[in-house]
Amino acid sequence: MRILLVEDDAEAAAFAAKGLRGAGHVVDHALDGEAGLNMAAAGDYDAYVIDRMLPKMDGLSLLAKRRDDGDPTPALFLSALGEVGDRVSGLQAGGDDYLVKPYAFEELLARVEALGRRRAPAQVTTRYTVGDLEVDIITRTVRRAGRKIDLQPREFRLLEYLMRNADQVVTRTMLLENVWEYHFDPQTNVIDVHISRLRSKIDKDFDKPLLKTVRGAGYTISDNN
């Protein structure tokens, strides 16, 4: 399953994301409600795990907006608010389940996987294309203009994340959390080094650059000028 976790507590997010990834799921993480809303709108997720109390936009408002846009993705709310009225308001906002903090990870995993089983079968995207660049996440192959490009595992993971979010600006924080699984900035140039290596492999020998730096914001991969 591909899961969007919206949680502003870095320690709690790291705990949940590590466990879900260890169970074989793909997890994207947003630190606040606005970022979570944007990622939900741009992504194709099998389930949402949303903390109720979030900066910039609370979890109830986030999910209500997605439901207003016709998004049926199953959602689980996490919250320290556990009264009956709190749970009811979460369900009325469009939630499918509600788990009170603190929780055992085994219960979180069981509830998330139950949400995945409820969702109607949908076509799973396994191949992403931007211009003449193609990435197959099943065979883990990359081709541009038909030419095979060899990437190291971290480079492939970086490219996969960029391709999943094509035409969207991806911030350094998003890359640190979703590619390196850092929930803090280690104050190194690790992102710059990998972006440079990736760019040299997918852009250097081709006429049109696809991997672009958005000054002061982050990076994007796009076929647009």
Image (spheres, grey):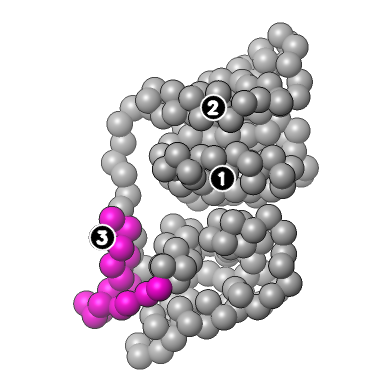
Can you give x and y, in whole percent of width and height, for residue 68 in the image? 56, 31
> Tag 1's secondary structure?
helix
**Sequence-wise, which precedes: disc 3 or disc 2?**
2
Residue 181's place in the image compared with 223, above or below, is: above
Q: Look at the numbered discs 2 and 1 and tell me whether their residues touch, using CB distance below 8 Å.
A: no
Q: Is 143 in the magenta?
A: yes
Q: Residue at x 73, y 72 (%)?
A: 187
Q: Along the horizontal axis of the image, is 81 left or right of 159?
A: right
* Alpha-carbon span between mark 1 and mark 3: 24 Å
**Residue at mark 3:** 139
Tell me the magenta residue range. 133-152
* Alpha-carbon span between mark 3 and mark 2: 31 Å
Q: Residue at x 33, y 27 (%)?
A: 120
| Mark sitting on residue 106 | 2
Q: Residue at x 57, y 80 (%)?
A: 193
Q: Along the horizontal axis of the image, is 66 left or right of 61?
A: left
